[in-house]
Image (tube, grey):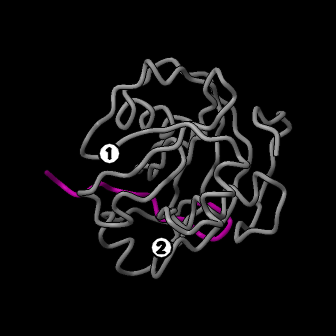
Amino acid sequence: MPDEMLDVVDERDRVIGQAPRPEVHARGLWHRGVHVFLVAPDGKLIVQRRSRGRKLMPLGLDGSVAEHVQSGEDYARAARRGLAEELGLHGVRFHALVKYRMVYGPNDNEISTLFEGRADPQRIALDPGEVDSIDRFGLDELEALQAGGRELFCPWFVELLRWYRGQSSALQVLHTYPKNRLLLP
């Protein structure tokens, strides 16, 4: 299977080229990503535990969906694709919360958009190559888990949660969108 092609962007999110995903990460090129926070009917955040086969952060707790934006794709389309590929969900309505720039790790420079929507966890059909399991947590429960230090959290998820709660975070906010959040900090 050929490598996933990503748009290479400048720090203002203008496309300046394309490159295979391994090259983008090897050279530290800016590229695009999306995250989706899904809220369950009980008002809790649907959190995924990444598959044990993942190269980066296996079994780490992460937001509902995390995806790279493929070359020629827009943020919303990548979010829909991620919902389908990782969780088997189609037709989920969601809205953008924030567009930001962040360094996710060594040579991993992304401009990303965080979306939020509602979903019934009973409809989820996990892709075991991507996701080991899902669970639901309130924001206070996630904060307590982090403080306890017994769970492995993806560092980007920690930063997204900090921003979501109105705390200082590593997100360099480029744009916020005028929608109300579904979860209350």
Horizontal side, residue 28 vs residue 143: left or right: left
Q: Residues under labels 2 and 1: Cα distance?
A: 23 Å
| Image quadrant in which you'd find residue 159 | bottom right
Q: Residue at x 73, y 49 (%)?
A: 140
Q: Which mark is residue 112?
A: none
Name the kind of residue labelled 1 in the image: Asp
Mark 2 crowdedness (10 Å alpha carbons): few <14, some 14-19, many ≥20? some
Total marks placed: 2
Q: Is residue 164 above or below residue 57?
A: above
| Precedes in sequence: disc 2 or disc 1 | 2
Q: Is residue 3 magenta?
A: yes
Q: The residue tagged with tag 1: helix, strand or loop? A: strand
**Residue 54 vs residue 60, the one in the foreground:** 60
Expressed as whole percent of the image width and height from the top left, the position of residue 116 reads 66, 36
| Image quadrant in which you'd find residue 156 | bottom right
Contact between labelled residues 1 and 2, with CB atoms less than 8 Å apart: no
Magenta range is 1-14
Q: Is residue 111 above or below residue 90?
A: below
Q: Which mark is residue 108?
A: 2
Expressed as whole percent of the image width and height from the top left, the position of residue 176 reads 81, 49
Horizontal side, residue 129 vs residue 120: left or right: left
Q: Is residue 56 above or below residue 145?
A: below
Horizontal side, residue 33 vs residue 165: left or right: left
Q: Residue at x 76, y 60 (%)?
A: 174
Q: Is residue 110 above or below residue 120?
A: below
Q: Is residue 157 magenta?
A: no
Label 1 sits on residue: 132
